[in-house]
Image: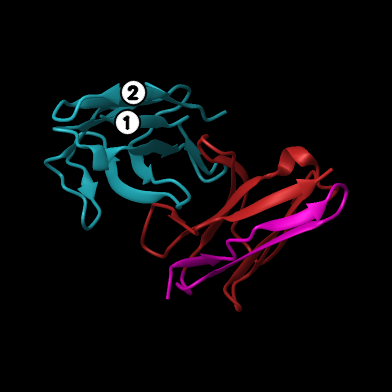
Chain colours: A cyan, B red
Amino acid sequence: GAVVSQHPSRVICKSGTSVKIECRSLDFQATTMFWYRQFPKQSLMLMATSNEGSKATYEQGVEKDKFLINHASLTLSTLTVTSAHPEDSSFYICSAVRDRDYGYTFGSGTRLTVV
Amino acid sequence: QKEVEQNSGPLSVPEGAIASLNCTYSDRGSQSFFWYRQYSGKSPELIMFIYSNGDKEDGRFTAQLNKASQYVSLLIRDSQPSDSATYLCAVIRAGANNLFFGTGTRLTVIP
């Protein structure tokens, strides 16, 4: 299969603090992972492409200094939301692709609430 | 023009009927097409992907791709209440490796 694990599933943090979200490919190696954000009743918007061993590629309008991405191994990418504010509250979802025959698999998502 | 367009719905069908979901895309060079199902509060789960023109069947689901018309659809036969969800169409554009999502179509299957 192609299983992607994401933790935590839910986090509440105070405004100004940082939150780290982990995304792991459990049964395959992923040189590339993707981070999406989804606001209520909206579709998924790509935030950045995480590349193992190199810098992430951020989409236009996404602050790279606020959303830190680290892809230190072939099975783990992390997204750190720094100095979180209430407007950062959203559903964050990671994705990885094993190969063409499996399509893109998503993690279970992280519901971030900043209070 | 949006990259990927879907009718937001809601689409309501009675149990046992065929649900037809449609999607159009703007980049003629797109090569890969995906249908995901997303339940409220959950992450998307892959239903099917299709790369070639024509039909692809998997159980109760059939994906149809027409590259000339830049159109991809998903048919759900014998719809069940558990199929009630938002269905997302996603496309990989030429030269890219990430998914572009439509806004999704909300489907309700009425028992």
The percent coordinates of residue A73 (x first, y second) are 27, 25
- Residue visible at 51% across and 27% down in the picture: A3
Tag 2 near tag 1, CB within 8 Å: yes
Disc 2 secondary structure class: strand
Residue B61 visible (yes or no): yes
Q: Which residue is mark 1?
A: A113
Judged from this view, the residue extending furthest toward the right is B16
Magenta residue check for A34: no
In this view, the residue in front, B70 or A81, is A81
Question: Would you place residue B48 above or below residue A25 in this image?
Answer: below
Give the chain of mark 1. Answer: A
Residue B75 visible (yes or no): no
Give the chain of mark 2. Answer: A
- Residue visible at 25% across and 43% down in the picture: A87
- Residue visible at 39% across and 24% down in the picture: A10
Q: Which residue is mark 2?
A: A11
Q: Amino acid at mark 1?
A: Thr
- Horizontal arrangement in the rendering, residue A114 relative to residue A107 (left or right): left
For the magenta stretch, what is the residue range? B1-29
In this view, the residue in front, B42 or B69, is B42
Question: Would you place residue B63 above or below residue B70 in this image?
Answer: above
- Residue visible at 42% across and 38% down in the picture: A95
